[in-house]
């Protein structure tokens, strides 16, 4: 009886192990283009194609103006919900496309409540706060090989003990939709730097018996003033600094984010469809649409 019981337990454990570990599990090699792409996909995406993933971050927002101390303007709570879908190309191989939408809410630095209005400390004017709500924020398809045959690599990936570190700097300098048609001559292009630093357990990332990895992330953004702040060309920049992680489910988000999404952004509980054809949105494009709509409504009333 005891022997049969032990045999049953052994078989049950073996079956459970077989179910938990995907068939053909292996160790990814970052030197191989297909594996390097898979590492990036596991960093960014959910457990499988079409399965949502949620990144969360929390931090502070400062001003930087020449000749004065930096000011702690806001706290920030943000999230990005995304999914990745399989794409194929006869020359470039099997890759993926990431589609997402994201919010970040500006909080009062003293009370940590979501701000609806804000008194500009330089002008004294009280303005309406426009939260970050960008839908969509989609990526181009990624493949193991580029159109000209170059292999996909992650040049900044490095291993330190049990950790993998993946720093990414994204310098941004492009047409500002709020600034007219002569930006190459008189300036006012959108100019920012976004920095994403991922840290993850090497075993979880490289061993495909795990369906995905759950990195931590630090995010720094240096940018122009938000347009809703009405800074009227004042010299200075904003510095965003936050940390967070990929979460296992939407419900793991803090209450302040879930409450605000339920109140004002209910579509942000799920990512866009995998074939989403829309152009990306930014704070600047969203703000322009809002101002254009307000002006059109005012004109209709006349």
Image (cartoon, rainbow, N blue to C red):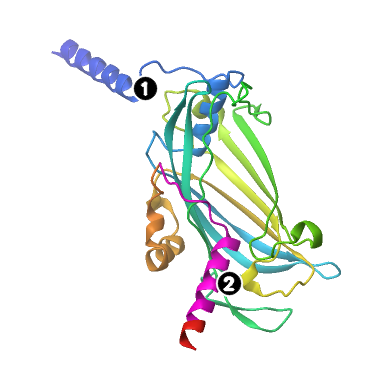
Image quadrant of residue 52?
top left
Q: Which residue is mark 2?
A: 108
- Location of residue 50 in the rendering, given as x and y in whole percent from the top left corner: 37, 38
- The residue depicted at 54 percent of the width and 72 percent of the height is 292
- The residue depicted at 42 percent of the width and 62 percent of the height is 255
- Image quadrant containing the N terminus: top left
- The residue depicted at 60 percent of the width and 73 percent of the height is 110
In the foreground, 218 or 40 = 40
Marks 1 and 2, Cα distance to the nearest angstrom? 46 Å
Please give the range of residues in magenta: 275-297
Q: Is residue 217 left or right of residue 12?
A: right
Image quadrant of residue 267?
bottom left
Q: Secondary structure at mark 1?
A: loop
Vertical comparison of 126 with 1: above or below: below
Vertical comparison of 151 with 47: above or below: above
Q: Is residue 23 left or right of residue 280?
A: left
Q: Which mark is residue 21?
A: 1
């Amino acid at each position: 009886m005891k022997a049969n019981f032990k045999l049953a337990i052994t078989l049950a454990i073996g079956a459970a192990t077989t179910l938990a570990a995907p068939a053909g599990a292996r160790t990814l090699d970052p030197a191989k283009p297909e594996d390097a792409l898979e590492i990036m996909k596991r960093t960014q995406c959910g457990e499988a194609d079409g399965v949502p993933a949620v990144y969360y971050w929390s931090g502070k927002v400062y001003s930087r103006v020449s000749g004065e101390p930096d000011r702690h303007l806001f706290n920030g709570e943000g999230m990005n919900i995304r999914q990745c879908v399989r794409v194929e190309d006869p020359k470039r191989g099997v890759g993926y496309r990431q589609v997402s939408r994201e919010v970040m809410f500006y909080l009062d630095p003293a009370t940590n409540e979501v701000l609806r209005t804000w008194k500009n400390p330089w002008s004294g004017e009280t303005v309406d706060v426009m939260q970050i709500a960008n839908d969509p924020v989609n990526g181009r398809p990624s493949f193991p090989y580029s159109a000209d045959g170059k292999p996909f690599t992650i040049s900044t990936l490095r291993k330190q003990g049990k950790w993998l570190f993946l720093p990414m700097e994204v310098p941004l300098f492009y047409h500002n939709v709020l600034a007219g048609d002569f930006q190459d001559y008189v300036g006012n292009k959108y100019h920012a730097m976004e920095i994403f630093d991922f840290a993850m357990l090497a075993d979880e990332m490289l061993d495909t018996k795990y369906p995905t990895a759950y990195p931590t992330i630090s995010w720094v953004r240096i940018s122009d003033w938000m347009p809703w702040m009405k800074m009227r060309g004042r010299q200075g920049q904003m510095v965003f600094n936050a940390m967070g992680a990929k979460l296992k489910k939407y419900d793991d988000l803090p209450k302040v984010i879930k409450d605000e999404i339920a109140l004002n952004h209910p579509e942000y509980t799920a990512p866009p469809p995998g074939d989403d054809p829309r152009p990306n949105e930014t704070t600047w494009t969203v703000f322009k649409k809002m101002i254009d709509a307000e002006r059109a409504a005012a004109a209709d009333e006349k």
